[in-house]
């Protein structure tokens, strides 16, 4: 995948292991968080992959079966169903046992911003795998939310790198709309001052 100024980002083996089963199972997903920030911005270390999923009533079972129990920890099907049924903020983890690294799985539910992002996600090739990537505006705004919650400057650094390297992909009007809707003006001003 080439983004921004032409950087090529290989898909780490762990992420490939976690994304291939989703593709094979036909689960509707998009990668966000640190891995998306790497694709749109600068390489850095990350020990997990953040994935937002849209799960139909039959998807929890397909998702659970997509990951071999001898290689992965997958929560009980009842937990996946319960989290998928939440209107907002459903969440569970899938852990690759050998490496102890994980996929943080977030269920989009009725989240208006997540639904918008799914309509604008894009399929990209990273390594030998096709991956659904969240739109850059979603990644940036979510990083603003994470910064507000945690105060960790790495989120601001990720945003600055994405704005520098992939500026041509960013629709500032879209960001401004979501910043206003999600009351992130203070956090956005910090980014604009970098």
Image: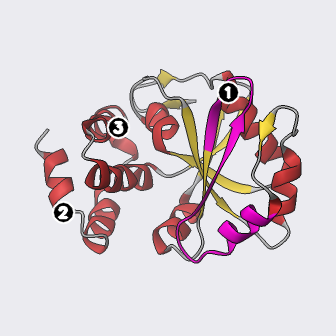
Crowding at label 3, few (<14), some or many (≥20) Cα neighbours within 10 Å? Answer: many
Residue at the spot of label 1: 14
Crowding at label 1, few (<14), some or many (≥20) Cα neighbours within 10 Å? Answer: some
Labels 2 and 3 touching (C-beta < 8 A)? no
Crowding at label 2, few (<14), some or many (≥20) Cα neighbours within 10 Å? Answer: some
Give yes or no for residue 16 being in the magenta stretch: no
Residue 169 image point, x, y percent = 40, 45
User: Going 30% across and 48% down the picture, which residue do you hit?
Assistant: 150
User: Going 45% across and 24% down the picture, which residue do you hit?
Assistant: 6
Mark 1 or 3, which is nearer the eye? 1
Is residue 126 among the parts visible in the rendering?
A: no
**Residue nearest the observer in this picture, 160 or 101:** 101
Image-quadrant location for residue 55: bottom right
Residue projecting furthest to the left: 193
Residue at the spot of label 3: 162
Image-quadrant location for residue 1: top right
From the viewer's perspective, tell me whether residue 84 is left or right of residue 36: right
Secondary structure beneath dot 1 equals: helix
**Residue nearest the observer in this picture, 39 or 15:** 15
Secondary structure beneath dot 3 equals: helix
Q: Earlier in the sequence, mark 1 or mark 2?
A: 1
Secondary structure beneath dot 2 equals: helix
Residue 156 image point, x, y percent = 26, 41
Mark-to-mark CA distance, 1 and 2: 35 Å
Residue 185 image point, x, y percent = 18, 63
Residue at the spot of label 2: 185
Mark-to-mark CA distance, 1 and 3: 23 Å
Q: Which color scheme does this rendered protein use?
A: secondary structure
User: From what the image shows, is residue 69 above or below residue 56?
Assistant: above
Q: In what quadrant of the picture does the C terminus appear?
A: top left
Which stretch appears magenta?
Answer: 78-103
């Amino acid at each position: 995948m080439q983004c921004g100024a032409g950087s090529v980002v290989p898909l780490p083996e762990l992420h490939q292991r976690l994304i291939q089963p989703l593709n094979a199972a036909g689960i509707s997903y998009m990668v966000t968080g640190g891995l998306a920030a790497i694709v749109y911005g600068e390489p850095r270390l990350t020990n997990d992959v953040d994935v937002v999923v849209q799960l139909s009533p039959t998807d929890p079972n397909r998702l659970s079966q997509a990951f071999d129990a001898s290689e992965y920890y997958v929560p009980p099907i009842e937990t996946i169903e319960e989290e998928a049924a939440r209107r907002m903020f459903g969440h569970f983890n899938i852990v690759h046992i050998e490496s102890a690294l994980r996929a943080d799985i977030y269920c989009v539910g009725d989240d208006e911003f997540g639904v918008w992002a799914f309509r604008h996600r894009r399929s990209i090739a990273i390594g030998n795998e096709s991956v659904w990537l969240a739109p850059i505006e979603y990644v940036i705004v979510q990083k603003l939310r994470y910064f507000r919650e945690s105060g960790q400057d790495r989120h601001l650094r990720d945003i600055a790198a994405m704005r520098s390297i992939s500026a041509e992909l960013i629709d500032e009007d879209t960001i401004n709309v979501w910043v206003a809707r999600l009351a992130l003006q203070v956090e956005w001003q910090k980014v604009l001052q970098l």
